[in-house]
Amino acid sequence: MGLFFTGPRGHEFICACSRRAVLLSSIASLLCCAQGQDDQEPPGNRHLPPIPNPSNPEDRKLPNGKSQNDAIAKQNHEQALKDTNDLIAVAEHLRDELQKAGNYVVPVSSVKKTEEIEKLARRIRGRLKD
């Protein structure tokens, strides 16, 4: 196995090199070139990317100076509390309806209230996951 090279006068000759030797020599030349480029650049000119803050990635400030993430979290908390109060109220109405209806009767409005309870529970769960 070898490589065919064409000389300056058009003569072809074979270099008996293995693939491993060619690969190692190309890697060595690339490393030498990279080392040479690093040596040419003065250390003061290197631009490093800013280190990201894991606790607040992209924490923007509102015009009043407060954190946008804090404002969103506060709004989500308030909405979750409101939805929880609504959930409790609907559940109490459902309990009252079922107690008034008797043992063998289920009002249609009770089924609709259970669907509303499910919807409120999903909404609350979604806010708490965020």
Image (spheres, rainbow, N blue to C red):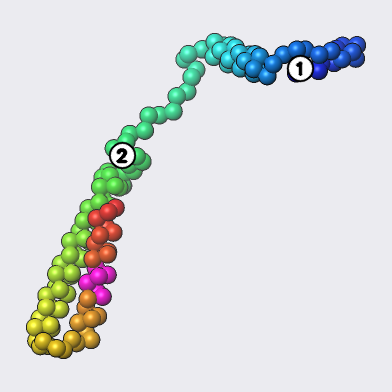
Residue at the disc numbered 1: 2
Residue at the disc numbered 2: 56
Identify the residue shown where x is 15% and y is 78%.
94
Q: Could you tell whether 120 is left or right of 102 in the image?
A: right
Identify the residue shown where x is 11% and y is 75%.
92
**Outermost front residue:** 1
Task: Pick the residue in front: 44 or 110.
Answer: 110
Question: Of helix, strand and loop, which mostly describes the magenta segment?
Answer: helix
Q: Is residue 79 above or below residue 92?
A: above
Q: Amino acid at mark 2?
A: Asn
Q: Is residue 93 above or below residue 101?
A: above
Task: Pick the residue in front: 118 or 10.
Answer: 10
In contact (CB < 8 Å): disc 2 and disc 1: no
Residue 7 visible at all: yes
Can you give x and y, in whole percent of width and height, for residue 127 in the image? 27, 57
Q: Secondary structure at mark 1?
A: loop
Task: Answer whether residue 17 is magenta in the image.
Answer: no
Image quadrant of residue 83? bottom left
Quadrant including the N terminus = top right
Can you give x and y, in whole percent of width and height, for residue 79 in the image? 22, 61
Identify the residue shown where x is 22% and y is 76%.
114
User: Crowding at label 2, few (<14), some or many (≥20) Cα neighbours within 10 Å?
Assistant: few
Q: Secondary structure at mark 2?
A: loop
Q: Of discs 2 and 1, which sits in the foreground?
A: 1
Magenta range is 115-120
Can you give x and y, in whole percent of width and height, for residue 81 in the image? 17, 61
Considering only order in the chain, which callout, 1 or 2, is on the residue closer to the N terminus? 1
Image quadrant of residue 89? bottom left
